[in-house]
Image (tube, rainbow, N blue to C red):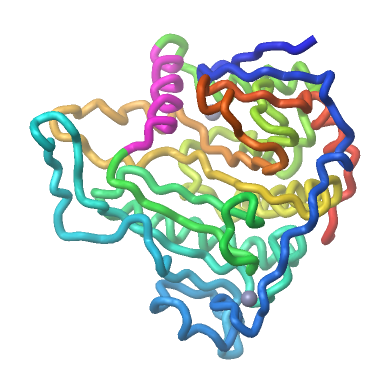
Amino acid sequence: MPELRRGPITDRWVIIAPERAKRPTDYRINPPRRDDPSRCPFCPGHEHMTPPELYRVSDGSGGWKVRVVPNKFPALTSYPELGREAVVGFFDKMKGVGAHEVVIETPDHDKDLADLPLDHVVRVVETYVVRLRELMKNPWHRYVLLFKNHGPQAGASLSHAHSQIIATPVTPKDVRDRLEAAREYYARKERCIFCDMLLAELKVGERIVEEMDGYIVWTPFDSRFPFEVHIYPRYHLHDFTAMTPEQIQGFARVLKRTLGKLKALLGDPPFNFVLQNAPNPVPRPGRPDYWATLQYDYHWHLEIIPRLTQVAGFEWGTGFYINPMPPEEAARYLREAEPVGR
Ligand SMILES: [Zn+2]
Ligand SMILES: [Zn+2]
């Protein structure tokens, strides 16, 4: 019997339709094609093929471990003014102000985060923190999103391991909805809604994949997609860039392990990950209390979404998702999976 579910934060319905449930192996799709390294702009020796580098983690012998470059085809770029206006007094528009960066995660053409040694994954996470911090210094960057597209079905145009950062001059609607839900909950209860959800999930237990190094990995009650999995810090922290070195180390370990489990269970699935971080708390003229409780009411987390099913007409028409894999079953499979690349 299908079931409609709605989570406490997103105010979004999903349909869990388990009679269609399959085993993880039924979701496996052909591993993504690997690009020819001789023409890969992210491989060492091809640095001239990318726009000038913004940041690098050196390997100590003239090479690099991680590089950050501007996106060659940026969605948004820096510009001296925002140019807010209303076209014929009605349609809002502004300049495409922002930033779009690419984090090249390794010089190795064929490795990804699940395969890399832990200390390398730590360098990658540190790089995310450094770049997000840098972009949040710009008051026009209202929101800075870190995300990853892996595999062509997830929107990756190059197979060499990379993630992207986009800074936007507005707070995206989905982010705003979540922030408002968290702020309203805090105003009523003086507690973080995410911390409360975490305690509830730990008590229920059946959707927890694991708890380690200060992080909890779970499949959400209202999972939209098969094997959707979220990583939350067990400790309360609103801003990803405020992590301590120990917290970075722990997150790197859990991220590598969780991606390794998905890879073991589903082959090399196409996936997106998205960092749900606090917005840039730039002062809002005339709204001095706008971010007053942000550090208490918001809680950063990472959403990993394997792209195994298609989003089709029903989803576009309703905003509902149909998920054939109950998250409780996905959690059980993930608990049992031995990660690759240990
Ligand atoms: Zn490459
Ligand atoms: Zn919290």
By secondary structure, the bulk of the magenta-drawn segment is best described as helix
Q: Residue furthest left?
A: 89
The stretch drawn in magenta includes residue 107:
no
| Span highlighted in magenta in the image | 171-187
Q: Is residue 76 above or below residue 87?
A: below
Name above or below for residue 103 compared with residue 272: below
142 or 151, nearer to the observer? 151
Q: Position of residue 332 (x, y in %)?
A: 86, 31
At 67% from the left and 78% from the top, the residue drawn is: 36
Q: Which of these two is toward me, 276 or 314?
A: 314
Quadrant location, the N terminus:
top right
Give the residue drawn at x 59%, y 41%: 302
- Picture quadrant where residue 178 is located: top left
Please state the horizontal and vertical placement of residue 153, each as a whole percent of the image. 64, 51
Q: Where does the image place residue 336, in percent across and percent down from the top left?
A: 90, 39
Question: In x, y percent, where is residue 100?
Answer: 39, 59
Q: Quadrant of the C terminus?
A: bottom right
Residue shown at the point (89%, 48%) measured from the top left: 338
Ligand 1 image-quadrant field: bottom right
Q: Residue furthest front?
A: 313
Q: Residue at x 86, y 31 (%)?
A: 22
Whether residue 302 sits left or right of residue 55 in the image: it is right
* Left or right: 262 in relation to 272: right
Name the quadrant containing residue 92.
Answer: top left
